[in-house]
Image: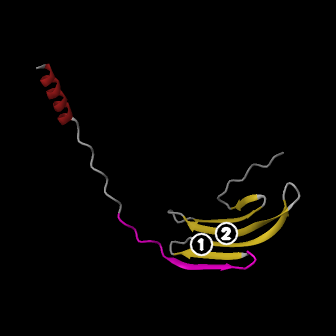
Amino acid sequence: MQIVLVVAALVAVALAAPAAPPAPAAPAEKEPVKILRSDFEQQPEGAYNYAYETEDGIKKDEAGELKTVNDEENKPQTVVVARGSYSYTDPEGNPHTFTYYADETGFHVESEDVPKAPAQA
């Protein structure tokens, strides 16, 4: 008899539990952003240029070239040096532009949107 009461109590608790909230509706499918321009050119020796622009205002241009530098053991190594820029407009309508280069010293970017380190005395 006790088992019947325990089972009945568990069933009552399960039926009294609140139902799970309905799953959120799937967001409406957005139309893919159109590419207005897309260029790519590769040179046999390894240099390249590429650029693209989309209808939502994103733009990117980059050029790369090979450069020979000496590594920490003073042995010549070939590295790619890339220079370029990209820009976009944020949802509030503000334009953002970044100019960069990347070489054996790392990635370096400049923009009004990138915080500047305070000058050291």
Residue furthest top in the image: 2
Which residue appears at 23% of the width and 38% of the height? 18
Which residue appears at 63% of the width and 76% of the height? 51
43 magenta-colored = yes
Do residues under tags 2 and 1 come within 8 Å of each other at their CB atoms?
Answer: yes
- Residue closer to the observer: 16 or 91: 16
Magenta-drawn segment: 28-46
Asked which secondary structure carries label 1, the reply is strand
Q: Residues within 10 Å of mark 2 (few under 14, many from 20)?
A: some
The quadrant holding residue 69 is: bottom right
Q: Is residue 95 left or right of residue 3?
A: right
Q: Amino acid at mark 1?
A: Lys
Q: Amino acid at mark 2?
A: Ser
Which residue appears at 17% of the width and 24% of the height? 6
Q: Residues within 10 Å of mark 1 (few under 14, many from 20)?
A: some
Q: Is residue 57 above or below residue 27?
A: below
Q: Is residue 27 left or right of residue 65?
A: left
State which tag comes first along the sequence, 2 or 1.
Answer: 1
Q: Is residue 50 above or below residue 11?
A: below
Q: Position of residue 100 (x, y in %)?
A: 71, 65
The residue that label 2 is drawn on is 85
Instruction: Quadrant for the C terminus, please.
Output: top right
The residue that label 1 is drawn on is 59
13 magenta-colored = no
Q: Is residue 54 left or right of residue 27?
A: right
Which residue appears at 40% of the width and 68% of the height? 30
Q: Position of residue 42 (x, y in %)?
A: 68, 78
Picture disc at residue 115: none
The quadrant holding residue 39 is: bottom right
